[in-house]
Amino acid sequence: MLELWKTGAYLIGGRDLVPADEAAPSHIKAKYQLEVSPEEAKQNTIAYSILQNHNTSGSADKLKIKFDCMASHDITYVGIIQTAKASGLKEFPLPYVLTNCHNSLCAVGGTINEDDHMFGLSAAKKYGGVYVPAHLAVIHQYMREMMSRCGSMILGSDSHTRYGALGTMAIGEGGPELVKQLLSKTYDVDYPDVVAVYLTGAPAPGVGPQDVALAIIGSVFQNGYVKNKVMEFVGPGIANLSVEYRNGIDVMTTETTCLSSIWETDSTVKDYLTEHGRSSAYAELKPGSVAYYDGVVMVDLSKIRPMIAMPFHPSNTYTIEDLKANLEDILHEVETIGNEQLGAPNVTFQLRDKIVNGNLLVDQGVIAGCAGGTFENLCAAADILNHHSIGHDEFALSAYPSSQPVYMELIRNGAAATLMASGATLRTAFCGPCFGAGDVPANNALSIRHSTRNFPNREGSKPVSGQISSVALMDARSIAATAANGGFLTAATELDVEYTNPAYHFDKNVYENRVYQGFGKPDTSAELKYGPNIADWPKMTSLSDDILLKMVSVIHDPVTTTDELIPSGETSSYRSNPLKLAEFALSRKDPAYVGRAKDVQVLEQNRLNGKTVDNAELQAAVAAIQTKCPVDVAKTNIGSVIYAVKPGDGSAREQAASCQKVLGGYANIAKEYATKRYRSNLINWGMLPFITADDTAFEVGDFVYVPGIKQIVKNGTPTFPAYLVRGGNLTEIQLGLGALTPDEKEIIESGCLINYYKTH
C-alpha cells in the first residue's frame, strides 16, 4: 500500500519522481530539457513559497512567521486571552476565531463552562474577534468552511489544526504561541524539511479517508519519518478524491507528528470554496517544474484496505482483514503491550473476551468531530445502514455532524432520518468523543470511532481508579458496516452497498444569524465577563544563576502523551483555573506527583520569602554537591522535575506544561520530545527542556543540580555537566537544551512568557 523512500527526490512537472541519487542536475537537463540547481529545486515546493511569503526574518532558514488568522476553542481561549491581556493586549491584530466545541456540555461543572463562553463573547466584543456559539461547529470544520484560503497560514491552539487540503498551511500549537501573534510577535522555527506524499490510483468503494490516514500513520510514526516536517501531498491520485475526503486524510497528519501539511489545489477545491461563498479564496497551488523533496511517501490509493488502529495509538494499525484472520494472536499482542503501557496493577486490559464465535464483538461506535463528522462520511454511513438495524443489545452508535450547516443538509436530504431509523442517535457539533467528554465507554468496553485519537487514559479510562476502556480507530464506513452487523467487526468492503454520493449545499444563514463577526471592530469600553472559575495565572519566578531540582516523577514508557501529563475529559471544566486544573496533573499516570511537587514548591516559596530552607533531604543533597562545587541555596532556584523518555505526544494543550510550572516545576528531562509544540510549551512557561543522551536511571527523590544554568542558557551551550545526588552519592551527568532562539532564551530567563512581555 505504501512505500517510504530512503532518499530525497525530484518531482518533475508535478508527476515524475526521480530519486535524488539518480537525479543530478545534468541528468534532469538531459532527460527533461530543464536546468535547475538543487537549491532552486528546494524552493519549488508549495510549502517553501507559502512559508517564505509569511516569513519576516529576512532569512530563508530561520523563519519568523506571521499568520493570517488564528483559532481557539473553549478550553484554550480563556487562558490565551488572559495571558495576552496581562502582556499588554489592546485589540486582536488578526482575525481570531473563538469556537465553543469542547466545553459545550454546560451541565458538567454547573455554570463553569457557560461562564467561559460568556468570557469568550465579551473578549470578541472588546478586542474584535469572531465568536462561534456552542453546537454550531467544531473548530476545524468552521475554519475549513469560513476561514481557509489558498496560500494562507492559520495558527490554532488545537493540535489538529490542519487545512492543507484547502491550500492553507496550518499549525497547531500551545496557547503561548497564539499569544505571541496577538502581541504582533512571530512564530519562530527553523525551515523544515518537506516530504512528498505522492498519491496514485483511486480508493475502492467502502474505503474512506480514515483508512488512508491510518495506513500513512502506521508507516511513518514509529520511525519518525515526517517528525517536525511538512507533508506535501502531490500526484495524480489527488484528482480522484473529493475535498472532504482530502480533509479527512489531512486532519490526521497530526498523528504522524509532522509540523504541517499542504496539498496541490485544483478545480475541486475551487468548487468547494465557491459553494461556501468564497470563490476569491481559491488559487491554484502546485510545485514548480522541478521540485526537491527530502523524502517520499508513496501511496497507491487503490491498494488501501479498510484499516483499524488498535489501542492505544493511531499508529497501531492493521487491516481489518488481517485482524479478523489472526484475531486471537493480534489481540493477545495488543493486550500485552497495552498492559505494559498502562502500568496499572489494579486493572487488566483485555480484549480477547470480546471474541464471540470467532468474531470480534465491539460495544460502541462513534462517528464524530473534525475527522469523522463530515457530510460525505455520514451520507456513506447512512447508505450502509439504510434498511438495517443496529440491534437491541449493548452495541450503540452515535454520530456528531461537524457543523450545523452539515446537520441541516443531512436532514434535508434524508440521511439523518436514515441513520436515526437504524437506531443510531445524532448529536450536535461537539468534540467531546475525541477527548473523553462524550459517549464515554463503559468499563472494559471497546469503542470503534472515526475520531482522531485512541490514547490510553483518554476516553474515560482511569486505570488508577480501576476503570479501563479502550478505543479503536476506524473509518465511518466500516463503523456503519459493523453496526449493520450487530456490532461484529465488519469492513465496509465486505458489504454490497450502493453509495448515493449526494451533492452538498451549504446554507450560510446558520452562521450569518448566529456568529459574532467583530474583527476590526473592537469596543475598548466593553468589559470582560468573568465567572468565579476564571482565575489569573499565579506569579512566576525568574531563573536564578543556579538550579537545584528534585525528581518527583519518573516515566519509562516509550512515549508519554499529553493526556497522561494532564488528563482531558472531566478536567476540561477547570482549564480556566490554573490552580484547580493543576491538581489533576499526572493523576492517571502517577497520582503521587502533585503531592511530591507541592512539597518541593514549599521549599522554593520559603527561599523566595527569605526563610531558612529547612529540609533534611535537601540539606544532605547540598552537602554532597558542595564536595565538588559551592552551592548558595538562597540564590538557587529550587524546583521539581519529571523524567520521561519521550514526552508530549498528542494535544497542543499548553496545560501539559503550565500545570507543572504552577506546581513549582522548573524542568523536564527527556531523551527526546515527542513534538515541537510540547517543547515550545515548556519554554513558554519558563521550564527548561533538558535532554540527556545518557541512559541514566533516574529515580523519584533524586536531586539534580545544574550550576551556572542562567549563563548556560544565555550562551546556548550545547551540552554541560550537572550533578545527580542519590542517597548521599554524587554522580556527574551530561545534559543539553537543544537549540534555543534568542527570544526563547530570554523567556526561560524571565520565568515565563508573561514575565518576558512585561519587559519587552
Image (tube, rainbow, N blue to C red):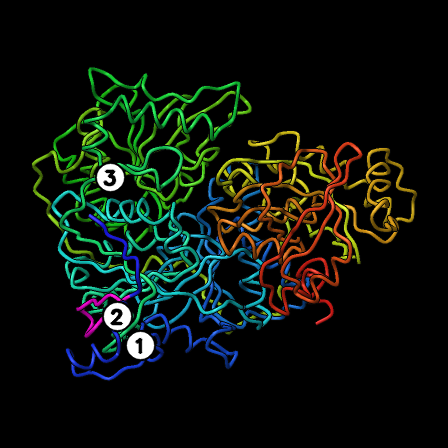
Residue type at tag 3: Met
Q: Given contact means CB atoms under 8 Å apart, are the residues at marks 2 and 1 in contact?
A: yes
Camera-near label (1 vs 3) is 1
On the image, the x and y values in percent for residue 695 come to: 58, 41
In the rendered image, is residue 82 in sight?
no
In the displayed structure, 119 sits above or below 626; it is: below
Q: Which of marks 2 and 3 is nearer the N terminus?
A: 2
Residue type at tag 2: Tyr
Q: Is residue 12 one of those drawn in magenta?
A: yes
Tag shown at residue 529: none
Disc 2: which residue: 10
Q: Is mark 1 on a helix, strand or loop?
A: helix
Tag shown at residue 41: 1
Q: What element carries label 2?
A: strand
Q: Quadrant of residue 38?
A: bottom left
Disc 3: which residue: 307
Give the magenta part as a residue range.
Answer: 9-20
Please report the residue visible at 77 percent of the width from the left and 36 percent of the height from the top.
729
Q: Which of marks 2 and 1 is nearer the N terminus?
A: 2
In the displayed structure, 353 sits above or below 660; it is: above
Please report the residue visible at 13 percent of the width from the left and 56 percent of the height from the top.
201
On the image, the x and y values in percent for residue 698 come to: 65, 37
On the image, the x and y values in percent for residue 382 come to: 18, 40
Q: Earlier in the sequence, mark 1 or mark 3?
A: 1
Q: Distance between the residues labelled 2 and 3?
A: 31 Å
Q: Is residue 73 left or right of residue 375?
A: right
Camera-near label (2 vs 3) is 2
Foreground pick, 43 / 680: 43
Q: What element carries label 3?
A: strand
